[in-house]
Image (cartoon, rainbow, N blue to C red):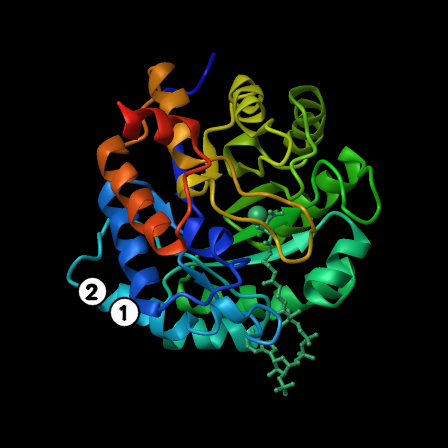
Amino acid sequence: KLPAKVRIVDVGPRDGLQNEKTLLPAAVKIELIERLADAGVAAVEATSFVSPKWVPQMADAGEVLRAVMTSPRRHAGVAYPVLTPNLQGFDSAVAAGAKEVAIFAAASESFSQKNINCSIGESLKRFQPVLARAQLLGIPVRGYVSCVAGCPYEGEVAPAQVAAVARELFVMGCYEISLGDTIGIGTPASIQRMLAACAGAVPIDYLAGHYHDTYGMAIANVYASLELGMATFDAAVAGLGGCPYAAGASGNVATEDLVHLLHGLDIETGVDMDRLLDAGSFILAHLQREPLSKAARALLAA
Ligand code: HMG
Ligand code: MG
């Protein structure tokens, strides 16, 4: 039986923009975040407190988050999580008003090295003080696992390895583990095998799907995950995105396509499609690009 309700985390302002070469003004990012919250998604991943040398687009993280958290347009029911790879990022995020953060690990050693410059084991050690400080401040921490269906450097990644890292993050205190198919290599069959392994380590209610659409499989992988009872999905408005440390990786499943699928299945999301399209059109005008979302293209042409 499919879930009656799904929680959507729009990661567009973070995952969607982190790879954009042209630096966007903070005001544009802030407006995008606010329009997505207006559209009714449960959470908008706003930015990341990472090294500006590594990800220049996110250099304005403090300015963006501070504006969003102090805005009269802020929605009480919407979460605005931000990525914090270490204590330095966490402290800056809290100073800018963060009420939720996310840490990010990987299921593959090479990707961990390329992405955050340390081994999986070292990264988990680095996250411990972040979780401890977050707990003291009552800040929920989400945990990511990257490369859950394959790694751009190592190829296949064993489901048991994904489950082991997910389990570690869960035991450390993450309230939810988002499973990232960073390079969009998964198919419904491999995603279900991976999820079956993870659900043996972390209850499915605490797992989220974060599927990139490189091979056009993301929406099929969402459906395959719904079949196993997963009820939280990450998506990016207009299908924006990619990871700077995974060449050729394209955006997340488009939020518009996800909402179209879910509403077609009578699954509640709380999202207003017209407002979502408006958020997408806004950012695409700034990027001078057409939407990757097929639903958005169809609806905007209608
Ligand atoms: P490092 O170089 O190993 O860190 O980077 P370090 O502790 O040795 O510090 C070196 C310099 O970085 C110092 O500055 C620090 O101050 C600075 P310097 O003295 O040289 O001027 N620094 C920072 N600056 C700002 N904010 C910070 C911070 N930490 C150190 N938090 C680090 C380690 C993790 C910081 C680095 O590797 C990094 O920023 N990586 C970025 C990774 C990233 O953003 N990747 C994309 C997001 S993850 C993703 O997209 C996957 C996901 O979507 C799921 C999926 O699809 O699979 C989540
Ligand atoms: Mg991602």
- Secondary structure at badge 2 equals loop
Q: In the shown orientation, is residue 69 left or right of residue 197?
A: left
Q: In the shown orientation, is residue 45 left or right of residue 128?
A: left
Q: In the shown orientation, is residue 2 left or right of residue 115?
A: left
Quarter assignment of residue 297: top left
Mark 1 highlights which residue? 67
- Residue 109 picture location, percent across and down: 81, 54
Residue type highlighted by circle 1: Ala
Q: Residue furthest top?
A: 1
Q: Is residue 2 visible?
A: yes
Quarter assignment of residue 5: top left
Which quarter of the rendering shows the C terminus? top left
Q: In the shown orientation, is residue 234 left or right of residue 41?
A: right
Question: Front-most of 141 and 25?
Answer: 25
Mark 2 highlights which residue? 71
Q: Residue at x 15, y 62 (%)?
A: 72
Question: Front-most of 281 and 60?
Answer: 281
Give the answer, above or below, for where 255 lies relative to 260: below
- Residue 146 picture location, percent across and down: 66, 47
Q: Residue at x 69, y 61 (%)?
A: 115
Q: CA distance from mark 2 to mark 1?
A: 6 Å
Question: Front-most of 257 and 168?
Answer: 257
- Residue contact between numbered discs 2 and 1, judged by CB atoms under 8 Å: yes
Q: Residue at x 66, y 27 (%)?
A: 191
